[in-house]
Structure formats: structure tokens, C-alpha cells
Image (cartoon, coloured by chain):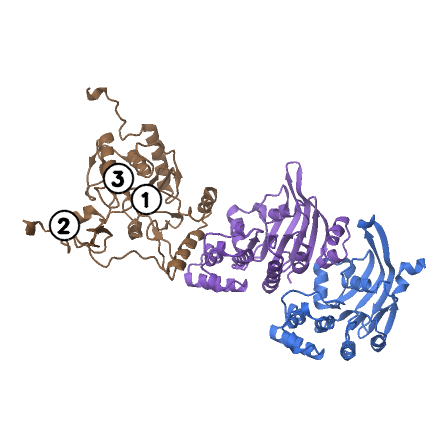
Chain colours: A blue, B brown, C purple
Amino acid sequence: MPTPLVVSEVAKSFTMHLRDGIRLPVMSNVAFSVKAGECVVLGGPSGIGKSSLLKMVYGNYAVDSGQILIEHGGRLLDLAAADPRTILSVRRATLGYVSQFLRTVPRVAAVDVVAEPLAARGVEAAEAKATAEAMLARLNLPRDLWQLPPATFSGGEQQRVNIARGFITDHRILLLDEPTASLDAKNRAVVVEMIAEKKAAGVALLGIFHDEDVREKVADRIVDVSAFSPRKAVA
Amino acid sequence: MSTADLATYNFAYLDEQTKRMIRRAILKAIAIPGYQVPFASREMPMPYGWGTGGVQVTAAILGPKDVLKVIDQGADDTTNAVSIRAFFQKVADVAVTTKTREATIIQTRHRIPEEKLTAGQTLVYQVPIPEPLRFLEPRETETRKMHALEEYGLMHVKLYEDIARNGHIATTYAYPVKVEGRYVMDPSPTPKFDNPKMHMSEALQLFGAGREKRIYAVPPFTEVVSLDFEDHPFEIQTFDRPCALCGAENVYLDEVVLDDKGGRMFVCSDTDHCEERCAGGHRGSLAYDKEAAE
Amino acid sequence: MTDTPLLKVRDISKFYGARIGCQNVSFDLWPGEVLAIVGESGSGKTTLLNCLATRLMPSSGSVEYRMRDGGMRDLSRMSEAERRFLMRTDWGFVHQNPADGLRMAVSAGANVGERLMAVGERHYGNIRETAGNWLGRVEISVDRIDDQPRAFSGGMRQRLQIARNLVTSPRLVFMDEPTGGLDVSVQARLLDLLRGLVQDLGLSAIIVTHDLAVARLLSHRMMVMKDGIVIEQGLTDRVLDDPREAYTQLLVSSILQV
């Protein structure tokens, strides 16, 4: 089995310049990997830094040291040391991310928000839109919302737009930050099903799931983040 | 008091140093057709707007053997023409004429004679505002740069605005031209009717702007093209009737109001041309018939 | 994606006497990339922008641009004629105050059409049609084509300025606080429009702004300037979500949460 994501010796701290420059160590010696077709779930108590770790892997948070190796375009590259242009190209082609909250763009219709990652990869507009509509339908988003900008949607509706957008591409690695948090049982089941399909397609998934029921259904392995947390060492 | 006691003017009013300065500017202008050459314009014994630029150019090129004609809107007998003619008679004692054909130098305010000018003749234009880009770009530093770099898109913006507003290019006078494929030039406020006469003219054309202190020139046999759009080509005015006095067609006509009841007639703006035709026996609809009157 | 940058900036410095405008700025801008330069007033961001756009002569350093024929040219070694030609064809410059970038006394159509006429377009009907299309793209009703921008609202003027710049399909657009003088609601609409245009046209852009929301929405990458020096740069979401320098943290934490 190929391993498209390997994290090793990663350390991260925040320096709070506005609070007299206190240095908050967040993580050290992070090491794990995700194989193709595997769903690895980050575990540990809340506040331990699971979301931060996901953001580091996505390039959204910088790391102090260590490597985040990603298989991108047939080559292995270190995202921790990559320049912005490379990170963007990795995100476009290889590395997908479903965040907890949708950062809405004004005036863009939900269906276009979902279709955008496909359009960005050069898929023809009509085809991208059709695929987006199928995703939204599957996630039971009422059809009359599709043409509206998601800014005014409820939390659950926004979350489903977000999931559709994240799952629409064939990214080889997918990061999931509590994708089911504000969903009802029916839609949670859809997401679980969609994750299973991604696994079957050989996608490497790394996620955070607080819902135990969902976690048990999707997780192949749990990586305990508290093992990397300096706070645990102190305690 | 005898005439010997009076202060005498230098020939043609200007002192020789000034004439040399102006001639140098003229030579440079001829060498770079359409380019506005700055010159040290002098105070003349007439107000700005009365042709101080044209007068200085004429004074600088006038010789004792020249025959001078002065027209104002095509007419030899209007105030501006009469005064300037009298001025040069007084300060240069040159022969004057109203006949286009006989003149060696013709100073003009806003017309080109109907009769074709020939080699050896010089047409001197009085120019109020020499800069064709002025109305769209008020900065002189910028317009000079635009000329230098041949950035003339703005000139078409003006024509575009014309069409957008009026459905056709409504500029009827001071219609911009491109000279010898290089400089865009304002032909002074002559009607665009006269623009084609500038093209490949045998005569030398000199332009003097006194207040603005610029001289420019179109040497003989120079290409002068009126700017236009492919789908709105340059066109001259046409008149739906001939001259009421001499019956001439395809000439530029002036409207003359005859009474306060709306009576009017259209006659040649070029008085010499009209008189010549009348003398040759041509008659228009309102021609004053001497024989019939007698 | 091509493998050569569109703009190569090396050690650009600009001094006003002993005072620093900007100092030792280097970066590459790639095709299709949007770079935001943020910082507060006086941080040197506009000086830097003007140095890049050849509106100011840098005291030292070089700016190279990849021409349409693929060759890299040093902007300071270009003739003024070439530079001005570049500026009205392959580049755009959007001013904060639309009156600085528009001809207020000519119609909207002529404002958009001017660049076309400047590069030799001589068919009135075509110019007008293109101008009309562009007005539509920037959400100005085509029946305003013969109105002068002085009759337009601030937001419309800014959109008109953008259309005027984009009509020649430039590859690089400089923007100086494009949303600066506008109401918040008008800003949002303009930003959204810009975002769409940049994406559809594959434009490269350098946007100077003090508004981090503008940077977040429009840019891929950002540089934070303070006292004429670039103190932090990187991927836009990285800089905004994980600011490392004290000043950047201050900027980010100063945003009002609504």
C-alpha cells in the first residue's frame, strides 16, 4: 500500500508577541503516516491540538521543524518547507480539506461554491456544476437553496455545502475536521458512506470526529494526539 | 513735420534679430512636418486673438517683392483682413492683392482659398490653440510626451465621443489631421471642408500661434490625413444648393441673413472666388443683375 | 502553470533623502498569482507598488518582467515609450480614487474604449460593442454607456476603472487600495467582482491594501510591511491564521469581529 502522507518529527509552538512574547509549545515529535485507502482519526481530549495538527498538515499553520511528506504529482515533497505556490498547487491537486466552518464568499451560489474546486482543476463548467448538484442532492440540501449564497444558511446546511465541496474532487489525501458535527443522523450516515467510498477509492483520510458512533464506523486507526502534546509531559 | 523726423519702422515691423529667430523656428517646423516648434513670440501692435502669430510669421518671411493677400473667414474685406493688410502696406510697403492667383503670401484666418494653390505660394494660418490634444489632456507636459511617443489614442476618444453623442463625427472645424504619418496636428479652426486641400498641397503652409508661442508647418507635397473610424469615415460638409451669387457648387458657403423675416441667402465664403466667377459671367439665383437694373 | 515568473523583483529600495520608502524587497510573482501587500499607512506599501509599476524610479534594485514574447526585460532599462506601451496594454493600474484613473469628462464607453483606440482599433462599432460588454461584466448597465463617470456613484466609478484597465486583457494588474473609499456593502460587491474577474481571466495582480479581509478574499500570498521592510510573507491563510511576527499578530488581532 502506498503511503501518500507521512508526518515526522514535527514540532510547533506559538509565540504570543502581544502577551509579552510567551512561547506556547503546542506539539513536538509528531510522527504518524496515513496509507492509501486508510482513515486515520486523531484522538485525544479537546484542546489538545487536533485541529492545529490538521491545519499544519494543510499548510495553514507553519511548523517549527520536521517534515510533512506528501506524494504530489508522482513525487514526494515536504510541505513544511514548500513555498506558497507549491502549497497551493498541492491543495489544488492532491490535498483536500473539509473544515468545521464554511468561510463563505459573498454572492456566490452554493452550487458554484461546491463546483469551484473542480473548475479550478480545469473541469468544464457544465460538468462541474452537474457533479456539484449531484453531491448536494445526495447530502439532502433542499434544491431551492442551491442557487443561493450559503451565508444565510443554517449551520448544518453550511456544513453540507462544505462537505460537498471537499468531497467533490478526487484528491488523494483528504483532511476532515469534524465534518459531521452539526449534522442530523440521516446526513451523518451519508457522510459515513461517502468516507467509505473514498477509502475504497484509495484515498488517504485524516480526520477528527467527536461523534463516537461515526468514529467507530470510519476509523481504521486512532492516533492519540496527546502523545505529541508537551502538556501531557508536564502533567 | 517732415516724414524724416518721424521714427521709422524696420522693414515689416519686426527687428532683424526677431525675424531670424522666427525663421529658424519656421525652418525647424518645415523639417519636422506637423511638429509644434516653440518660439519667442513678440508683442505685436494688436491684441492676441487678432492674428499675432500669423502676422509674425508673415513679417519674418515677407520680402519687398512679395504680393500679399489677407483673408478673414474667406473674405478680403472684413476688419481683421483689412487691418492686417493695411499694417503690412504701412510697415513693409509691399504690394497687396485680393486675387488668390496673384498672391505670393496669403495670410488667412480660418479658410483655405477655393482656388488651388500652386508652387511658390505660402499660406500663413493664424492659430488660436495649436495643441489638438489640449481639450482632453490639459497638461502640457503630458501632451508633449504623447506627441513624442506617438500616443494618439486620445484623439480618437474625442471622435468617439462625437459619434456617441451625435451619431456622426460632429466636429466641423479644427478637425484633427495626421501629418506625414507622424504628428497629429490641429489645422487651426478652418472648416473641415478645407482639410483635403492641405493634402499634397503644392504651396507651403505655415501656422503661427502668437499667444501660445508655437509655429508649425506643412511643407509642399506632404501627406495630410484627417482622422476617422473605419465605419465612420471622414467626410466634408456638402451644401444642398449652389452659391446664390455666382452659382458655384462644391464650395464652402456662408449664410447671410437678409432681413428680419427669416430671409437668408447662401454665398461663397471665398469672396475673391465669387467675384471672379461673377466677372466670368456665372450667375446664381439671387445675383444682382447690373444690366437688368439699368 | 508555467515555470518562469511573470515578475522578478530583486532588492528594491527607495529612499526619500535619508528617509526609507521601502528597503530590500525581493520576490517573484507567478502567472495567475495574486499578491497582497498589507501594512498600515506609511509602511511603504504604496511606494513599493509604484516602484514595481514604474511610476517611481527605485533607488536601487531591479524589476524584471516577462514580456508576451517570453523574454525577461529589466523595466528600468526599457525606453519610456516601451514602458508606457506596456502600461496601457499588458498592465493595468487601479487607483484608490477612481478620478485618478478615469477621464471624468468623457463617457463611460470612451473611458473603456480608450485603450483599444490607443493600440490602433479604428472601428467605432467594434469599440462600442467591446466597451458595452465590459460594462456588463463589471455590472454597469449598458444604457449608461454614454454617461460620464461624474454621474456615477463611487462604486460604479471604481468598477468602470476596472473595466477600463481590463479591456486590453492585461496579464498584470496593480491595485492601490481598490476598495479604499467605498461603503462596506459596495466594497463587498466590488471585491466579489474582482475575485471573479481575477479567477476567470487568470490575472496576476499585486494589491496594496490595509484591509486584511481584502487580502484574505483576493490574494494567494501576502507580504506584511512595516517601516519600509517586508517583515513577514507567505501563503495568505498561513499569515492570517498563524501570524508569526509581533506586528502581524497585532494587525490580525486588531480586526473587529462582527
Kindly identify the residue that appears in the image at 41 percent across and 57 percent down: B160
Q: Return the disc, 3 or 1, that comes first in the chain's sequence.
A: 3
Q: Say what amino acid the circle numbered 2 marks.
A: Cys
* Nearer-the-camera pick, C235 or A32: C235
**Residue C6 is at least partly visible in this image:** no
The mark lying in front, picked from 3 and 1, is 3
Is B210 above or below relative to C179?
above
Q: How far is mark 3 from mark 2, CA to CA?
A: 25 Å
* Badge 3 and badge 2 in a common chain: yes
**Residue A97 horizontal/vertical position (percent):** 75, 68
Is B5 above or below relative to C16?
above
Q: Say what amino acid the circle numbered 3 marks.
A: Asn
Kindly identify the residue that appears in the image at 52 percent across and 53 percent down: C88
**Where is mark 1, residue-wise?**
B219
The mark lying in front, picked from 3 and 2, is 3
Q: Chain of mark 1?
A: B
**What number is the disc on residue B278?**
2
